[in-house]
Image (cartoon, helix red, strand yellow):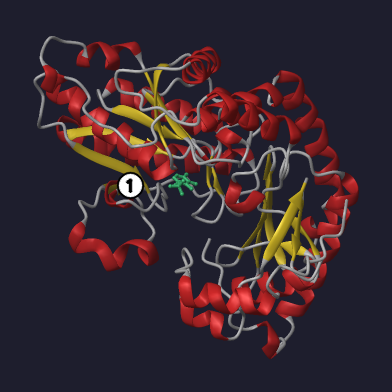
């Protein structure tokens, strides 16, 4: 690829970083920490690589916060957006429709067995839609008291007030506790360190019993359980087996509580199937997808529901309808990007991903047996390890050391993970491995370099 030297007309990187700190409030960041480590200025991207203003290439090993599936600048997605731009960039979706949103909705329905897609721009808003739909469904059925939610311990469902109410991450939630309606949680299975199948089964049993006893007491007042199927990513890549998800589905059905599958992070092939629910043969009542839906090009999320849900809103009475909207609902450019992404993410690609993941997993062997890493785990295009006796500021320190070595990585607490675009090849993965090993060594050294302080990495 072309090394992207800044054009003479471009402002120097240091200047842009300083202006960014004066004018931009960066997400999920304690801005003061940028005093010692300014944000890196990115000027280009191609495939798994980002290019900074100094012309240094960085492997995007976290898919730019889990959204990028087929690399930066993917030509088919780019062309689809450009072609749509020539027709119409946006129309409101109330009272009007367009081919892109129809085709996308049909294809998502065909792939998931659910229907009547609704659209928002972000994952949090998709979850808001699902939660509102669930409570409104019970209200329409004459059971308005079923309006509470339950989530799993360590859950992450986004940052808006409703989504934060079902999120169980103290750091993100506690400052806003008085503003929220905080949902109950039941413990998720904890598999870390459980080696044999019997121990895993016992832990799954324990988690299912906890959910069942909670449902027995609370189902009459509960609209829905919301889960992140198979992997709770933001919790530090907490995995549960498909069997747990299947039993959760049964329990929800038996106790008349909706199951909301938040597949914002794990959908779109990330776990090896189109949805994670497929791996457990489970059909949720609501399926939320986002992040990778447009291949990382444009903000778009979707909520699909069952026919039963749809039917409960279909009425002569306006107020029984779902009167929810966002300005950019069903944006045609985003739909075009999503359709191009679905074209790329066919069954052949999922098969090729499985093969690639096997090769990468073998390549990452030095991490699996690294003396400071524990609990190596892998599913689809996700790898995670826990750092043993990590220093308190490990995530920040490691992130900066990795950047120095040409890899964009942001550990969550003491959990190191890779979530690369599906187009990473073995050469790039080899570089990622070397950068990771080097950054581990530098950041776990006693009193690691002072130069590696001041960044941040919360998620
Ligand atoms: C990222 C994420 C969200 C929130 O999505 P946004 O697009 O950031 O609002 C919700 N749920 C899960 C599981 C996520 O990983």
Q: Report crowding for label 1: few under 14, some 14 to 19, many 20 or more residues within 10 A (C-alpha).
A: many
Would the CB of label 1 be found within 8 Å of ligand 1? yes
Q: Which of 241 and 200 is in front in this view?
A: 241
Which residue shows up at 32% across the image and 21% down it? 253
Vertical side of 85 occupied by 55: above or below? below
Tag 1 secondary structure = helix
Q: Residue furthest right?
A: 427
Q: Which of 165 and 365 is in front in this view?
A: 165
Image quadrant where residue 451 sits: bottom right
Where does the image place residue 173, in percent across and percent down from the top left? 32, 61
Where does the image place residue 281, in percent across and percent down from the top left? 53, 19
Which residue shows up at 54% across the image and 15% down it? 107
Q: State whether residue 310 appears in this view.
A: yes
Horizontal side of residue 447 vs 172, given as left or right:
right
Which residue shows up at 13% across the image and 18% down it? 318
Where does the image place residue 420, in percent across and percent down from the top left? 71, 47
Where does the image place residue 57, in percent across and percent down from the top left? 81, 61
Which residue shows up at 38% across the image and 31% down it? 329
Vertical side of 377 occupied by 38: above or below? below
- Which residue is labeled 1 in the image? 163
Vertical side of 429 occupied by 269: above or below? above
Vertical side of 294 occupied by 451: above or below? below
Horizontal side of residue 113 vs 363, given as left or right:
left
Image quadrant where residue 308 sits: top left
Q: How many marks?
A: 1
Q: State whether residue 274 appears in this view.
A: no
Image quadrant where residue 231 sits: top right
């Amino acid at each position: 690829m072309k090394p992207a030297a800044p054009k003479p007309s471009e402002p120097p990187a240091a200047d842009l970083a300083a202006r960014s700190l004066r004018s931009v409030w960066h997400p999920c960041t304690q801005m003061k920490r940028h005093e010692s480590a300014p944000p890196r200025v990115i000027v280009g991207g191609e495939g798994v690589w980002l290019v900074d203003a100094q012309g240094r290439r960085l492997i995007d090993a976290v898919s730019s916060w889990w959204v990028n599936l087929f690399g930066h600048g993917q030509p088919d997605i780019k062309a689809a957006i450009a072609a749509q731009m020539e027709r119409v960039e946006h129309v409101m979706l109330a009272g009007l429709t367009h081919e892109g949103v129809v085709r996308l909705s049909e294809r998502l329905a065909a792939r998931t067995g659910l229907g009547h897609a609704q659209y928002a721009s972000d994952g949090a808003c998709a979850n808001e839609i699902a939660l509102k739909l669930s409570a409104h469904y019970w209200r329409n059925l004459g059971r308005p008291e079923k309006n509470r939610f339950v989530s799993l311990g360590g859950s992450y469902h986004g940052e808006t007030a409703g989504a934060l109410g079902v999120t169980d991450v103290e750091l993100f939630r506690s400052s806003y506790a008085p503003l929220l309606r905080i949902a109950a949680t039941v413990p998720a299975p904890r598999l870390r360190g459980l080696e044999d199948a019997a121990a895993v089964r016992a832990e799954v049993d324990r988690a299912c019993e906890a959910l069942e006893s909670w449902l027995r007491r609370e189902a009459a007042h509960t609209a829905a359980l919301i889960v992140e199927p198979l992997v709770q990513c933001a919790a530090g890549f907490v995995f549960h087996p498909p069997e747990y998800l299947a039993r959760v589905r049964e329990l929800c059905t038996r106790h008349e509580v909706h199951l909301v599958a938040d597949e914002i992070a794990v959908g779109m092939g990330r776990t090896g199937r189109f949805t994670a629910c497929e791996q457990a043969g489970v059909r949720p009542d609501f399926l939320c997808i986002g992040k990778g839906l447009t291949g990382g090009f444009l903000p778009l999320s979707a909520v699909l529901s069952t026919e039963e849900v749809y039917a409960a809103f279909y009425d002569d009475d306006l107020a029984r309808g779902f009167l929810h909207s966002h300005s950019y609902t069903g944006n045609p450019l985003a739909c075009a990007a999503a359709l191009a992404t679905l074209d790329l993410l066919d069954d052949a690609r999922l098969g090729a991903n499985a093969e690639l993941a096997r090769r990468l997993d073998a390549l990452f062997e030095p991490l699996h047996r690294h003396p400071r890493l524990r609990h190596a785990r892998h599913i689809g295009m996700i790898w995670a390890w826990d750092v043993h006796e990590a220093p308190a500021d490990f995530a920040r320190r490691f992130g900066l050391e990795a950047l120095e070595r040409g890899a964009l990585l942001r550990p969550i607490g003491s959990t190191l993970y890779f979530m690369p675009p599906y187009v990473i090849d073995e050469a790039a993965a080899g570089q990622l491995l070397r950068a990771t090993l080097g950054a581990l060594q530098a950041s776990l050294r006693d009193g690691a370099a002072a130069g590696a302080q001041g960044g941040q990495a919360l998620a």
